Image (spheres, helix red, strand yellow):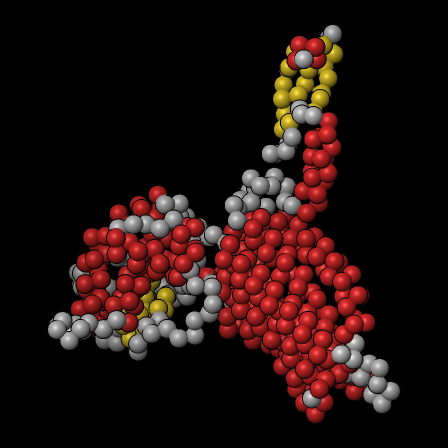
Amino acid sequence: MESARGVVLATERYGSAESWKYFAKDAVMERRRDGSEGASRGNSIVGVFKSVFLPQGYPESVSGDYLQYQFWDTVQAFSSSLSGTLATQASLKGVGVGNQAATVAAATVTWLLRDGTGMLGRILFAWQKGTKLDSEAKKWRLFADVLNDIAMFMEILAPYFPACFTLIVCTAGIFKSVVGVAGGATRAALTVHQARRDNMADISAKDGSQETLVNLAGLLISLMLIPLVTDNPILTVGLFFLFTTLHLFANYKAVRSVVMETLNEARLSIVLQQYLRDGQVLSPPEANQREPVFLEFKKTVPIKLGVRLQEVVQSPEDLNLALKENNMPYLLGVRNGCVCVCLGPEASVQDEIRAMSQAVWLSSKLSHPPSRDSPAQSNWEMVHESHKMMDKIFNPFLKGVEGAGWDIKRTLLDWDEWRVEWKTKNN
């Protein structure tokens, strides 16, 4: 068959799609698709779908968790679209749509107050939590969607409390503004993770196309739902809880499917604790499966990175204690129930990982006080012990981390911007 077609001159392939062959026969070069005709038609349809909704070069151009994340993200977007329709209908009813006694001015004022408080909430939240959205993208992504469901539920209930309607919708507007900031910022952080060819713009654009298609499907379903739920509060609330349950489940599965190869505080803590227990270095998929995805509002001994010098030492004697057993470009101390790390300007990424590892060990030790039989240690004695331990274990630990597939060229540790140069005893 091959000889009947001619001599194969070359073979080409578009990404991981079907291949084409060039044949030479009777001094003429002919290009033919490799494979059967029926498969070619199917591949053509799939190819058009991929080019419209998936990034160019998929799957090689994206991370391995892309498809699973996008599937669950699509499910949550669809359910959120349906919940949003119910909330919008309730809001319009609350401002007076369909009520002849309501005035346009009153409805306009309510809408403006809701939008205005939302704008202020957006600014304040970005100011307070903007730096956390990179290092804890999974947690804030899930938090945003939970808060969005709470806001929509408030909007559905608001018409049944006319005396507090404006207060309720303004509060819901603040929640939705927080959702907009947290959801948009964490989506950008996840896009950076998914992009493997510096193709963040393409991934973001195709994500928008996927979301538009899902919203269009949600719109069509909503047109069928609206006549059913109008003046039927029980059905409205019942459908809302059904869609919300699906929404939250899909969001949980989505963030659980993300496998980040960069170290943040939670993933580094999980990997280090496992290494200290049995010498095993967890791979990114293993550590990501153990990473908590819900926000933790209580931390026994929190860690503060990149602090001012006075948050670590209070006197020249404290500075000498901080420098004891320490030849690294950072200082550690325990102050006011926190492990504080002061970073030097010449510190490298590996130094940052070591400082964070040492702080994690200190935090764990302080969170679990020794038994009565063990001698009590001062905070500085524990700091000195942590320096000695890091001198012993850090280099093999770092090699193991790199060998397990972690990216040690950059981190997602939440460092503040303070950098300090200090004088040693020799100076």
> Where is residue 326 shown, x and y percent of the image?
21, 60
> Where is residue 195 shown, x and y percent of the image?
55, 47
Residue closer to the observer: 16 or 220: 220
Outermost residue to the bottom: 163
Q: Visible in this render: residue 199? A: yes
Instruction: Locate residue 303 relative to residue 324 in the image: left or right.
Output: right
Instruction: Locate residue 1 relative to residue 128 in the image: left or right.
Output: right
Q: Is residue 82 above or below residue 168?
A: above
- Quadrant of the image containing the N terminus: top right
The residue at 47%/67% (across/down) is 294
> Where is residue 62 shown, x and y percent of the image?
56, 45
The residue at 69%/88% (across/down) is 161
The residue at 68%/76% (across/down) is 237
Outermost residue to the top: 26
Residue closer to the observer: 20 or 205: 20
Outermost residue to the right: 100
